[in-house]
Amino acid sequence: MATLDRTVEHVRQSESFPELCLRTWNRRVSITHRRDAQICHLECEAQELTQIWQWLIHDLDFTFATLIVEEVPNGGWSCVYAFYQQGSPWVYVELQLGPEAATVPSVVGLISGPSADWHEREAEDLFGITFEGHPRLGEFILHEDWPEGVNPMRRDFDARQPPIHRDPDPQWKPPMVVEAPGAFAMPIGPVFSDFAESAHFLLETVGEDVIRTIPRLFYKYRGVEKIAEGERVDRVLLLAERFSGSAAFAHGLAFCQAVEAICGVEVPPRALALRTVFAEYRHMQLDCTGGRDQPGRADRREPPSLDLRGRSAPLFLRRHQTGWTCLRSGR
């Protein structure tokens, strides 16, 4: 335990983390430390991936953030796993694959916290990468009407041409797990809601007890990421704002920050101040309404007059200061 405590203390000092990596992996991993961005980049082979995951998660108490998949220009693949810990640099673990190798070891089940389960399923659907050992690949984002072998985020996919519609298999059965006398599956949905994600739930039940629930989401998948490829930055900003009508400014701000970080753009102080003001306007509106300012919500308990006053005050203030009621481009 004392050894682990000393190791964690080393990690909290960003200057010592690359040396810790070198001592641990004995040059089996390529290490690059970007001090300006506080990022430690580890490039490894497929056989080292699960060991590095366990080392970061279990030994050093890092938290998994996300998986970024990219099809590189030579036809190969880049899979970047991002990890973070307070007081330490971000850690990017990159696995590069050749064009003929589209198989990656699955890391599902290595941790009990935030898992890469959905990340791997999404990458398998959209890019066609197989995660060896994953128990639930297939039909995650792309449902049964998408033809097999069509992956919309690949470079050779033409977003201007609609994919060939696939007829449903009449022999298809839901993936049931519960095996007991009287067990059956009960479908609920799909519920096509307005601002929220549409969902379908398959409940496995024995009598009145629901033993297992299988959610099915992404009915509203539109391939916006593919539409954005090759477009101008100002055009993609409009797409980012339209992912969610209730978070248009937040998504637009996040996109701008990502572009600025990639291009090394220094934002003027006035622009930073205006961004803070606009973001706080949205924060105020949520605080005034308790998050109930969205259409379609059925859980409002305040009288309509109070709810209207709570929503109106930030909107009037925002219009007085900026000239616009809604913080969205193109209005």
Image (spheres, rainbow, N blue to C red):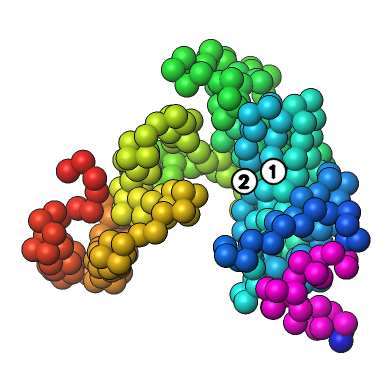
Residue sitting at x 91%, y 61%: 26
Find out whether residue 20 is within the magenta segment: yes
Q: Quadrant of residue 175?
A: top right
For this view, does 34 lie left or right of residue 177? left
**Eyeballing the image, is 34 above or below 173?**
below
Image-quadrant location for residue 178: top right
User: Which amino acid, by three-letter code, is at mark 1?
Assistant: Cys
Q: What crowding class fits label 1: few (fewer than 14 Cα within 10 Å), some (14-19), or many (20 or more)?
A: some
Question: Do the numbered discs 1 and 2 sit on residues whose CB atoms are within 8 Å?
Answer: yes
Q: Position of residue 102 (x, y in %)?
A: 76, 31
Task: Give the secondary structure at mark 1.
Answer: strand
Q: Where does the magenta region start and end?
A: 3-24
Would residue 254 be visible to someone looking at this image? no
Task: Tell which circle, 1 or 2, labels the residue nearer the N-terminal end.
Answer: 2
The residue type indicated by label 2 comes to Ile
The x, y position of residue 160, in whole percent, is 44, 17
Q: Quadrant of the N terminus?
A: bottom right
In this figure, which residue is indicated by the disc labeled 1? 79
- Secondary structure at numbered mark 2: strand
Which mark identifies residue 68?
2
Judge from the rendering whether residue 132 lies leftward or rightward of residue 291; answer left or right.
right
**Residue plotted at (88% across, 46% down):** 47
Q: Is residue 23 visible?
A: yes
Residue 331 lies in the magenta-colored region: no
**The residue positioned farthest toward the right in the image shown:** 26
Q: What is the magenta segment's predominant secondary structure?
A: helix
Of residues 220 and 256, the one drawn nearer to the viewer in this rendering:
256
